[in-house]
Image (tube, grey):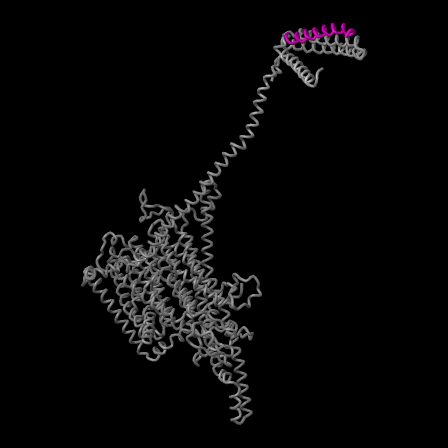
């Protein structure tokens, strides 16, 4: 329990970050805002990885590596998503995700 | 084509085929014109061909074709006739020699060699004389064989046959003697058919000539039929000149084929062909209801007769296995001498008679066949042993017999006697229909609706006489019972028809009834043993009745289609040739001495007299024709006086009446000459010696006639004074008839109308033709119609009802089946589809397209999954 005390703090921070990100994604109408929410969620997860890597003996290496993967993937994701947003803007002159409802059933 | 000199009989075949060729030509041209007519207006080529073939109305071309073909046929017939007469005389001599030889040599043959030996013992032999006798005998034998050869060759010259249809598929069955296997088309010329050929072609030629004038109205592009009324006045139609001559040609062919035929079946086919020609020509003006009704009546009445004919044919075919006349007769009538047997009935030779036997009593004792005479079967003689010998028809020499001594040749067949009677009655019924005898006489007077030349050719001279011809042809087939029926039917007919002829006023109807009456005379003659007399009367009647009809046609043409004698009178000055030639015809039919009718009628009366002398219970058969001779004279003179003498009864008709052109008067003159002289002979005052009658008697009369009527013939030959007596009686009756006619219609001493008022009942009875039409209408036509109506009702109500019911039931079942299909089958499939659709539709709502909602769902789903896992974990026993 004692060794894990600091971990609890990180986990809470990560949960907070994750929740903030999800809420940001669910509420923002601006595509950029949504992307920011995505970054928050990813980074919340990253915090978890890193925390487990530091405080849990089973995840010392894995936590690091997954965190690195997530960062790389986040970079790719951001690039792709921004490209989509730019194109979306070119077509609709807006970045309001609510106007992108053409995929509805 | 075979050499004519080898088969001169082909001349007659040629004569038969010529009108057929004419008919075919006319039919082909008519068919092409018919096919081209719709295109003539559009295509110039079609128009040119159409015009070349005669255009809208053909002109006189068809008449020339028909006339040419029948005239050529006439020439062939004349040549053939002369040739045949020479051959027939030759054959007669040969036959005489052969019979003579046979009679000399038959004796020892029959009495066996025993007797001859005895004789030889009695007389001492003189070698030289014996040798001489043997040599003479050998010479005689050579001569005899030569004679037989010549005789057979000559016979073969005048007959021939083609295989037509074979019922057994195999040719090996030819030898089947019991069953009929073969139908042939054949010809066999004897004196009767040769004379008939000349008569038919001559009269047909003259009538063709007459028709060229008589039918000239049909040449117009549009003919107005005054007797057909439509909403727009009289009926107008295209002229039918070509059609008339086409039918005439077909008729001539059929009629000649009927005479030519050597078998019953070919006759039957021609019989129907002439019937259809008669139908077509009676209904020539078919727009007139009366004409089409008359055509139907003629056709249907003839069907009744033909039904009997077919029954007769079936019996003949079944029992004799052949339709060939010669074969039938040789099988029905006993041969004079069968190969080596003599057939005896009660110890007397039975040659030429129909042999009745009891099946168990046919005994063969040595050379003789002994028979009981009054059994219930008739003997059918084997075919082989009497081939070539024709005991029924010719006195053919029996030594020409080709005897195959096979076991079968001794087999005799049997036919139940009553069936032989039925066969005879059936064939006679056919003749009754065709020759308009009682009780089927009703159609002939109505048949006068046809054009007059048709009445003259078909309904007076030739077709209606075909019945008489057939009775004469089939004579050996008839049993005594049938012959008596024929005689009585003839007797009734001649009286009934003559009595009606006294009161009718339509000039053609008078002649029609007169025809029926004269045909009755012929039938009567055939039935009482006057075979020659009956057929001679057929020939003479053909000439004078054709003359009378053409004369009436000339009158009708001259009076612009006025047929009622009440509107004529005093026409003698206007149409002298017609009047005089008709007077010749009237004198001939009345039986004025030295006119042709006298010869034949006298002979008939003599035959009837002989018959009623030997059979006193049948005295009516003499009385009826005798009385009717007077009636005939009366109504014929009445007709002539009413038409040609006295004051004109109708000014309009009289004023416009005129003599007809030469094409119509020439045939009248020629026919008048023949009506006078066709039966002449030497010495002319003796009807027995009529040349034509002699020809028929010697060369064609079946030997059976003399056998069947032996008693009456012997009586007549024994007492020549009977001839004179009967002749005088007839003349007296005729004189009475003339006297009545003169008193009533020429001198007008008595007013005919007053005479009629004396006997109103009789007059009405006669005017209604003995109520035959009414009787048939009540007995047959009306019940027939009622039955037909009933059938029609049954058809509409029961049959149609049933069909409709089935249809309705079907519809109902289909409706229910449709409901099931739509409701259950389609419904379940549709329900599935509907459910899928609505589920899908509802799920659409989830897909908002909003990114936010997706995220929300993701989060909520993740939470839900987590909570589920959590709940599951707690349920599994704490964390």
Q: Is residue B572 visible?
A: no
Q: Position of residue B116 (x, y in %)?
A: 52, 88
- The image shows residue A92, relative to residue B633, as above or below, that is above
Q: Residue furthest bottom?
A: B124
Screen quadrant of the C terminus of chain B: top right
Between residue B354 and residue B789, name the one nearer to us. B789
Segment tinted magenta in the rendering: A1-27
Q: Position of residue B119 (x, y in %)?
A: 51, 91
Q: Quadrant of residue B748?
A: bottom left
Q: Is residue B620 visible?
A: yes
Q: Quadrant of residue B264?
A: bottom left
Q: Position of residue B187 (x, y in %)?
A: 48, 65
- The image shows residue B257, relative to residue A76, as above or below, that is below
The answer to if B676 sits in the magenta stretch is no
Between residue B640 and residue B606, name the one nearer to us. B606
Secondary structure mainly formed by the magenta segment:
helix
**Horizontal side of residue B826 vs B672, given as left or right:** right
- The image shows residue A25, relative to residue B265, as above or below, that is above
Q: Position of residue B455 (x, y in %)?
A: 35, 58
Between residue A71 and residue B437, name the one nearer to us. A71
Q: Quadrant of residue B853?
A: top right
The answer to if A24 sits in the magenta stretch is yes
Q: Residue furthest front?
A: B877
- Looking at the image, how many numbered discs can be counted on the residues? 0
**Horizontal side of residue B443 vs A6, given as left or right:** left
Between residue A36 and residue B678, name the one nearer to us. A36
């Amino acid at each position: 329990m004692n060794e894990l005390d600091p971990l609890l703090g990180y986990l809470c921070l990560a949960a907070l970050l994750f929740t903030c990100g999800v809420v940001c994604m669910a509420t923002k109408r601006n595509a950029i805002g949504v992307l920011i929410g995505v970054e928050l969620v990813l980074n919340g997860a990253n915090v978890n990885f890193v925390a487990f890597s530091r405080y849990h003996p089973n995840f010392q290496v894995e936590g690091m590596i997954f965190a690195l993967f997530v960062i790389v993937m986040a970079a790719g994701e951001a690039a792709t998503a921004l490209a989509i947003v730019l194109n979306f803007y070119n077509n609709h002159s807006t970045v309001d995700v609510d106007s992108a409802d053409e995929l509805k059933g | 084509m075979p050499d004519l000199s080898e088969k001169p009989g082909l001349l007659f075949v040629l004569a038969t085929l010529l009108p057929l060729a004419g008919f075919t030509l006319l039919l082909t041209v008519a068919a092409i014109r018919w096919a081209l007519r719709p295109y003539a207006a559009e295509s110039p080529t079609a128009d040119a061909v159409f015009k070349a073939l005669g255009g809208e109305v053909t002109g006189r071309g068809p008449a020339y074709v028909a006339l040419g073909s029948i005239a050529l046929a006439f020439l062939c017939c004349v040549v053939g006739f002369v040739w045949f007469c020479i051959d027939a005389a030759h054959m007669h001599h040969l036959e005489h020699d052969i019979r003579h030889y046979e009679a000399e040599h038959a004796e020892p043959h029959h009495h066996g060699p025993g007797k001859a030996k005895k004789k030889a013992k009695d007389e001492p032999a003189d070698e030289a004389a014996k040798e001489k006798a043997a040599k003479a005998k050998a010479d005689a034998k050579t001569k005899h064989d030569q004679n037989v050869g010549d005789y057979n060759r000559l016979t073969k010259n005048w007959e021939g046959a083609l295989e037509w249809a074979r019922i057994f598929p195999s040719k090996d069955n030819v030898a089947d003697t019991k069953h009929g296997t073969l139908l042939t088309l054949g010809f066999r010329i004897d004196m009767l058919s040769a004379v008939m050929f000349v008569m038919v072609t001559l009269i047909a030629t003259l009538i063709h000539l007459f028709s060229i004038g008589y039918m000239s109205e049909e040449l117009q592009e549009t003919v107005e039929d005054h007797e057909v009324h439509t909403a727009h006045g009289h009926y107008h139609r295209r002229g039918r000149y070509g059609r008339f001559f086409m039918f005439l040609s077909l008729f001539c062919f059929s009629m000649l084929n009927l005479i030519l035929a050597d078998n019953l079946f070919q006759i039957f086919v021609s019989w129907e062909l002439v019937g259809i020609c008669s139908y077509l020509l009676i209904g020539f003006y078919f727009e007139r209801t009366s004409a089409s009704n008359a055509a139907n009546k003629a056709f249907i009445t003839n069907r009744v007769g033909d039904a009997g004919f077919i029954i007769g044919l079936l019996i003949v075919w079944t029992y004799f296995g052949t339709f060939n006349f010669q074969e039938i007769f040789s099988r029905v009538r006993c041969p004079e001498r069968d190969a080596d047997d003599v057939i005896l009935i009660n110890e007397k030779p039975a040659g030429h008679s129909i042999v009745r036997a009891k099946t168990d009593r046919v005994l063969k004792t040595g050379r003789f066949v002994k028979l009981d005479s009054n059994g219930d079967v008739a003997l059918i003689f084997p075919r082989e042993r009497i081939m070539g010998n024709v005991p029924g028809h010719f006195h053919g020499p029996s030594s020409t017999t080709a005897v195959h001594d096979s076991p079968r040749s001794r087999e005799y067949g049997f036919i139940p006697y009553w069936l032989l009677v039925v066969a005879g009655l059936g064939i006679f019924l056919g003749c009754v229909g065709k020759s308009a005898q009682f009780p089927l006489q009703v159609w002939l007077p109505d048949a006068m609706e046809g054009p007059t030349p048709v009445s003259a050719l078909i309904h007076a001279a030739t077709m209606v006489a075909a019945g008489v011809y057939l009775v004469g042809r089939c004579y050996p087939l008839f049993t005594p019972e049938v012959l008596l029926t024929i005689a009585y039917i003839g007797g009734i007919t001649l009286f009934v028809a003559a009595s009606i002829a006294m009161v009718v006023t339509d000039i053609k109807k008078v002649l029609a009834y007169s025809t029926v009456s004269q045909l009755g005379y012929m039938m009567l003659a055939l039935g009482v043993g006057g075979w020659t007399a009956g057929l001679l009367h057929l020939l003479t009647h053909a000439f004078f009745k054709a003359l009378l009809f053409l004369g009436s046609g000339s009158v009708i043409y001259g009076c612009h289609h006025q047929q009622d004698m009440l509107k004529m009178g005093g026409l003698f000055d206007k149409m002298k040739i017609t009047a005089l030639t008709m007077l010749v015809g009237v004198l001939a039919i009345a039986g004025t001495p030295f006119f042709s009718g006298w010869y034949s009628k006298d002979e008939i009366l003599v035959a009837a007299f002989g018959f009623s002398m030997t059979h006193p219970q049948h005295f009516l058969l003499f009385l009826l024709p005798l009385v009717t001779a007077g009636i005939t004279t009366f109504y014929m003179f009445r007709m002539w006086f009413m038409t040609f003498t006295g004051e004109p009864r109708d000014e309009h008709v009289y004023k416009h009446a005129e003599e007809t052109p030469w094409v119509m008067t020439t045939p009248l003159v020629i026919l008048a000459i023949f009506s006078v002289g066709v039966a002449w002979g030497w010495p002319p005052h003796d009807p027995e010696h009529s040349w034509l009658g002699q020809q028929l008697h010697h060369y064609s009369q079946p030997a059976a006639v003399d056998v069947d009527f032996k008693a009456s013939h012997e009586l007549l030959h024994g007492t020549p004074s009977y001839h004179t007596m009967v002749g005088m009686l007839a003349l007296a009756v005729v004189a009475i008839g003339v006297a009545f006619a003169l008193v009533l219609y020429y001198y007008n001493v008595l007013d005919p109308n007053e005479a009629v008022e004396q006997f109103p009942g009789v007059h009405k009875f006669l005017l209604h033709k003995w109520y035959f039409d009414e009787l048939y209408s009540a007995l047959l036509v009306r019940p027939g119609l009622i039955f037909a109506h009933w059938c029609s009702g049954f058809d509409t109500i029961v049959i149609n009802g049933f069909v409709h019911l089935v249809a309705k039931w079907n519809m109902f079942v289909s409706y229910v089946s449709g409901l099931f299909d739509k409701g259950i089958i389609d419904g379940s499939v549709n329900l599935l589809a509907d459910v899928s659709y609505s589920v899908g539709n509802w799920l659409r709502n989830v897909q908002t397209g909003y990114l936010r909602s997706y995220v929300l769902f993701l989060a909520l789903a993740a939470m839900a999954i987590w909570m589920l896992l959590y709940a599951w974990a707690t349920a599994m026993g704490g964390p």
